[in-house]
């Protein structure tokens, strides 16, 4: 182990020599970047670990993704602990193995689901904190709150203590999940935005898979209550990595412009785009942001919140409703029926033994993680709408099949081993459809669909809706399985089927659009016929983003791009638009050349 880290340290030193020569590093390793930062960044006075361009954007995606990895871990860890003997003995009032009454099932559902209520409170807090503190600081403080909640849970000896710990951790997680997609979307290029947020979705499933395997591994540990305390405590390690590095990354440049810190925004955009701070592209972006903020820039937080419920030219309420229900529908698919109770379903409903049920839950989480890689390729190729429709149709069919197979596998109806195996398979299939169509989508779409001036409060409200319906699902599932058994799946089959026309008629495509282009789409829509926005998005031509002359951009920086490095391409700026015009009144009109392509 010592030799391994010595080798990595030598490699880090060799990579650092690339940084001090002013070149873009070839390595894309986030953890190497972290070590370089700790060793050299402060001493050399460089910012953002010396990263620039796409490398910096990917590093932001990595540290932001750790927040979602932590979110996934927290969601999955409790499911494998509920039936542990030591856990049941410690918290007898939620022991549904020895007490199968409806009352005990209700208490168990409540104790597990209060985490979602904490998340909802945290998400709603970003309505005020999101624009007050900025994106990075909200993530930073939210992660510390998670650490406090995890410590309380790990040290719990009574159910009340466990519940308090879950609520506290939930508040922190709500802050993170409402903020990370905004930060990521506001720092990424239009053509990369979908991929970056899909990576976050992938890391949710990665966290879930890790929690399942850790639960499975510690099932065999027979040292006091270590079998459940260590898996709960493990999340602290992930959280410490986030708090160590998140403040070293750049703030959202769009938020910086919003709060009047234009020079800081130029510096951040220069790093993100690997260009000079007065580059025409940066002038253009700042102009666009200012133009969109001009009418509301003097508003207080309360006035901004009230703005959400207005229509006007920007259609804020319409867009807020789309964001709210997009997040709500993700939970109403029934995914957390499986995520929270996978091991319990395999053991109690499909009658597997302790070891097999936990092994299947871990395998299910692993397959879920692998399926979540598919949107990396498909999110920009097929767009948001098609993936959501694909997922909803597949989920509806799968839940319908699960109703029949789970019923047939119940010994009270007919002891059918083949039906039990089929039910196990379709639990895997459901996760695959969800991973492709919905896992990362609802963390991407609301951040895209809302305008900058209300993005933070709408993100808070929409994320709160996710946690509200998450709470509802996690709360009712133990009661549902206790009362109507396999017919619980029928409810979710019907909901998924109803989602299909809602998505098809009401949700416009946002793939390949800048956030400011999406504003233009909604400006064209009629408030009396909100479904028109789907057709407008389909008809409106897309701009050619980032079509700049690369040599002039390199010259503006006073340096050449290293040989072999990918060179960013930028959108052509209106003729006559320079750094001088960027400082003019943001309400001034600018004639834009025809840089659109029809698709």
Image (cartoon, helix red, strand yellow):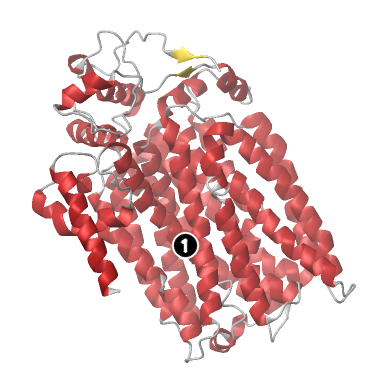
3 to the left or right of 225: left
Report the quarter where the N terminus lies: bottom left
Counting the numbered discs, the total is 1
215 to the left or right of 59: right
Residue in the image at 75% along x and 59% along y: 489
189 to 214, vertically: above or below: above
State the image coordinates of residue 524 (x, y, percent, origin top left). 52, 17
Residue in the image at 42% along x and 27% along y: 514
Residue 474: in sight, yes or no? no
Residue in the image at 69% along x and 87% along y: 98
State the image coordinates of residue 120 (x, y, percent, origin top left). 48, 56
The outermost residue toward the right is 414
Q: Residues within 10 Å of mark 1 (few under 14, many from 20)?
A: many
Residue in the image at 41% along x and 52% along y: 65
Q: Which of 143 and 379 is in front in this view?
A: 379
Q: In which quarter of the image is residue 300?
A: top left
Q: In which quarter of the image is residue 361?
A: bottom right
State the image coordinates of residue 237 (x, y, percent, origin top left). 35, 69
Q: Nearer the viewer, residue 57 or 224?
A: 57
State the image coordinates of residue 123 (x, y, percent, origin top left). 44, 52
166 to the left or right of 141: right
Q: Is mark 1 on a helix, strand or loop?
A: helix
Would you name the residue on which mark 1 appears?
Answer: 118
Residue 196: in sight, yes or no? yes
Q: Nearer the viewer, residue 554 or 468?
A: 554
40 to 355, vertically: above or below: above
Report the quarter where the C terminus lies: top right
């Amino acid at each position: 182990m010592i030799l391994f880290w010595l080798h990595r340290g030598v490699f880090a030193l060799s990579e650092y020599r690339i940084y001090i020569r002013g070149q873009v590093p070839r390595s894309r390793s986030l953890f190497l970047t972290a070590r370089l930062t700790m060793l050299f960044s402060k001493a050399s006075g460089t910012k953002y670990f010396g990263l620039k361009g796409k490398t910096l954007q990917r590093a932001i995606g990595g540290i932001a993704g750790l927040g979602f990895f932590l979110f996934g871990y927290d969601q999955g860890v409790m499911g494998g602990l509920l039936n542990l003997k030591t856990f049941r003995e410690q918290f007898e009032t939620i022991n549904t193995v020895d007490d199968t009454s409806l009352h005990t099932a209700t208490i168990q559902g409540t104790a597990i689901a209060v985490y979602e209520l904490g998340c909802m409170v945290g998400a709603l807090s970003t309505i005020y904190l999101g624009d007050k503190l900025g994106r990075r600081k909200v993530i930073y403080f939210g992660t510390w709150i998670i650490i406090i909640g995890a410590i309380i849970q790990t040290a719990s000896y009574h159910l009340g203590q466990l519940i308090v710990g879950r609520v506290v951790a939930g508040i922190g997680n709500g802050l993170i999940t409402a903020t990370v997609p905004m930060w990521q979307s506001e720092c990424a290029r239009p053509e990369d935005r979908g991929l970056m947020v899909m990576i976050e979705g992938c890391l949710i499933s990665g966290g879930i898979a890790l929690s399942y395997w850790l639960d499975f591994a510690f099932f065999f540990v027979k040292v006091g209550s270590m079998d459940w305390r260590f898996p709960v405590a493990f999340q602290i390690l992930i959280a410490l990595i986030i708090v160590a590095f998140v403040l070293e990354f750049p703030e959202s440049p769009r938020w910086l412009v919003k709060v009047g810190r234009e020079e800081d925004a130029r510096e951040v955009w220069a790093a993100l785009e690997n260009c000079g701070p007065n580059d025409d592209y940066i002038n253009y972006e700042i102009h666009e942001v200012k133009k969109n903020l001009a009418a509301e820039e003097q508003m207080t937080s309360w006035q901004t919140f009230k703005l959400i419920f207005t229509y006007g030219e920007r259609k804020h309420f319409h867009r807020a409703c789309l964001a709210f229900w997009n997040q709500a529908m993700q939970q109403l698919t029934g995914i957390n029926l499986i995520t929270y109770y996978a091991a319990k379903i395999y053991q109690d409903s499909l009658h597997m033994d302790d070891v097999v049920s936990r092994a299947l839950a871990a395998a299910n989480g692993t397959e879920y993680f692998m399926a979540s890689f598919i949107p990396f390729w498909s999110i920009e190729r097929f767009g948001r709408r098609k993936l959501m429709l694909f997922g909803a149709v597949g989920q509806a069919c799968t839940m319908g099949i699960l109703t029949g197979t789970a019923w047939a596998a119940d010994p009270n109806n007919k002891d059918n081993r083949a039906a039990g195996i089929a039910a196990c398979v379709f639990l895997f299939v459901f996760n695959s459809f969800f991973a492709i169509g919905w896992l990362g989508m609802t963390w991407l779409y609301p951040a895209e669909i809302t305008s900058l001036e209300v993005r933070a409060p709408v993100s808070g409200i929409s994320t709160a809706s996710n946690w509200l319906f998450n709470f509802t699902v996690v709360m009712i599932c133990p009661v549902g399985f206790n009362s109507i058994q396999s017919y619980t799946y029928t409810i979710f089959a019907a909901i998924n089927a109803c989602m299909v026309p809602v998505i098809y008629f009401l949700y416009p495509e946002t793939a390949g659009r800048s956030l400011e282009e999406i504003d233009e789409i909604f400006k064209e829509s009629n408030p009396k016929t909100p479904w028109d926005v789907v057709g407008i998005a389909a008809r409106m031509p897309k701009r050619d983003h980032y079509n700049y002359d690369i040599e002039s951009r390199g010259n503006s920086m006073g340096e050449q791009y290293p040989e072999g490095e990918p060179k960013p391409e930028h959108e052509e700026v209106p003729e006559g638009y320079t750094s001088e015009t960027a400082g003019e009144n943001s309400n001034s009109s600018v004639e834009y050349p025809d840089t659109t392509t029809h698709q």
